[in-house]
Amino acid sequence: MPPFPRRTGATEQYNNGIMIHVCSLALLNKTIEETGARHVVTLLGAADQVPLPSQIARGNYLRLFVHDIVDPTPGQNHPDVEHVERLIAFVRAWPRETPMVIHCWAGISRSTAAAFTTVCALNPKRDEHEIAQAIRAASITAQPNTRIVRFADQLLGRNGRMVEAVQALPPCVPALQAEPFRLDLA
């Protein structure tokens, strides 16, 4: 089964547009093209150059300048509560008419944490453990960044359940880059 549905026409519906695709930077443009996504979230360090894909309007693009770290490290941008607040605001404004792509350098940690946050923010009644398990089922390399998850858990009032769900995941398979995968909101 392909990691995401192939576009067959401009009006094709993707589960009513409620689909998130997670990928690495190297596969960003290919993922956008193959999914028809028109909203993108980038989680990379400030020095990482990412040209805005031509298919994405500036207002449909969120760039978070964060490194993939859990503890603050000198010279690096650690994910902070303000980053997660911006992510939540952006995904809540997403009209869900076309898919969204969330990516980081490898598609393993920051992007999977952001995808987890997105599903929790947009579907507040969905069980956190079920969402985490859906991420693991879609990607054996997924290892959501716990710092991002911790802030999301607090902001979304999930009372520690998001953190517990991520900590309960079996170990990921180590990789330098993940295969793109999709995550449904419902």
Image (cartoon, helix red, strand yellow):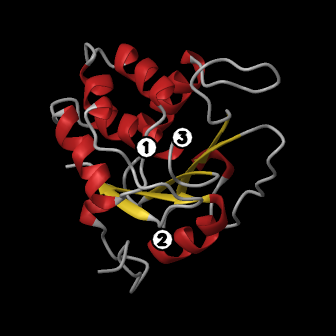
Discs 1/2, front: 1
Q: Position of residue 34 (x, y in %)?
A: 49, 77
Instruction: Please tell me which of labels 1 and 2 falls first in the chain.
Output: 2
Residue 104 drawn above or below residue 113: below
Q: Position of residue 129 (x, y in %)?
A: 19, 36
Secondary structure of residue under mark 3: helix
Spatial separation of the CA atoms under disc 1 and disc 2: 26 Å
Tell me which corner region of the image, top left, top right, bottom left or bottom right, holds residue 57.
bottom right
Secondary structure of residue under mark 1: loop
Disc 1 residue type (three-letter): Gln
Spatial separation of the CA atoms under disc 1 and disc 3: 8 Å
In the picture of the structure, the residue carrying the numbered disc 2 is 36
Residue 129 drawn above or below residue 54: above
Tell me which corner region of the image, top left, top right, bottom left or bottom right, holds residue 53.
bottom right
Spatial separation of the CA atoms under disc 3 and disc 2: 22 Å
- Asked whether the beta carbons under mark 1 and mark 3 sit within 8 Å of each other, the answer is no
Discs 1/3, front: 1
Side of 50 where 171 appears, left or right: left
Discs 3/2, front: 3
Quadrant of the frame with the N terminus: bottom left
Q: Position of residue 113 (x, y in %)?
A: 44, 38
In the picture of the structure, the residue carrying the numbered disc 1 is 143
Asked whether 112 or 102 is in front, the reply is: 112
Disc 2 residue type (three-letter): Gly
What residue appears at the point 25 percent right and 64 percent down from the top-left corner?
15
What residue appears at the point 28 percent right and 16 percent down from the top-left corner?
160
Tell me which corner region of the image, top left, top right, bottom left or bottom right, holds residue 27.
bottom right
